[in-house]
Image: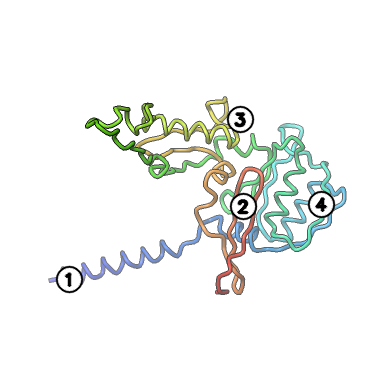
Amino acid sequence: MRTIPIVICFVSLTIALGLRAQSEEHVNAKVLGQLVYSDITVKLDEVSSKKALDDFEKQLGIMLWVQWKDDESVGLDSSETITLELKEQPALVVLERIVEQLDHEGNAAWQLRHGALEVGLKSQLASPGRHRLETYYIRDLLFTIRNFDAPELGTFGGSGRDGDGSGTTPPTQQEEIDRIIELIIKFIEPDLWEQNGGPCSITNYKKTLLIRAPDFVHRQINGYGFLARQPAQVRQRRVIYSKDKTRIVVDRLPIR
């Protein structure tokens, strides 16, 4: 009989595939690693934005795609000048400082896609072809601690107030979900959501948010769900993303 050898072979194959899946690196891990772990010094004085980004690309050895303005399409102005002086700062910090100066109205952004770094106007980076669908499980955000009042003396029916004892009807779960969606739309790139005429969509299904948006929007919601490629003999770094600022924190763990 061949049943046992076949079963063993199947189990071995399953384990091998599982180990391979665990060891597979995210397509954007390399470029994110370069941004997080490369400390660079820049001294730019009225340098054209194109030269500044070209030098940045060469210094990091990454693939950089920039949507420049031309006669046929809108984009960033390559003649816009950059003035910046930073010493031994993570490349990610340098990048964000450069991007801030690419458009004085704050319409420029950067994102990771297909193993490359993209820089351009938010409206271009948010085009439907650059969207990806992400799911966000929000059950923990819907948990409400109920507040019960002690019954009054001489009564058996308690305070007689509704729900949590506050005298008001608590919001339904759907109302809580709608509130979470409302807050995301309000604080994270408001102009880009379809509720405001933009290309990005957000809805929910069974306590899970379904969001179709570009990388730079997802980054503001939940950061990156993969690890940056970490060079040997360096301490691990964590990146804290927010709409206005990105911070890089060095973990005080043993050097691997």
| Comparing labels 4 and 2, the label whose residue is closer to the camera | 4
* Mark 2: secondary structure: strand
Going from the N terminus, do you reach mark 1 or mark 4 first? Answer: 1
User: Which label is found at residue 84?
Assistant: 4
Mark pair 3, 4: CA separation:
29 Å
Residue type pointed to by label 1: Ile
Going from the N terminus, do you reach mark 3 or mark 2 first? Answer: 2
Callouts 4 and 2 close, C-beta under 8 Å? no
Say whether residue 223 is left or right of residue 134: right
Q: Which residue corresponds to the image point at 21% horizontal and 68% vertical from the top-left?
A: 6
**Which residue sits furthest left?**
1
Q: Identify whether 167 is placed above or below 240.
A: above
Residue type pointed to by label 3: Asp
* Mark 3: secondary structure: helix
Callouts 3 and 1 close, C-beta under 8 Å? no
* Mark 4: secondary structure: strand
**According to the image, label 3 marks what residue?**
191
Residue type pointed to by label 4: Leu
Say whether residue 18 is left or right of residue 238: left
**According to the image, label 1 marks what residue?**
4
Going from the N terminus, do you reach mark 3 or mark 1 first? Answer: 1
Going from the N terminus, do you reach mark 2 or mark 1 first? Answer: 1
**According to the image, label 2 marks what residue?**
116
- Quarter of the image with the N terminus is bottom left
Residue type pointed to by label 2: Ala
Image position, residue 31 (x, y; %):
61, 57
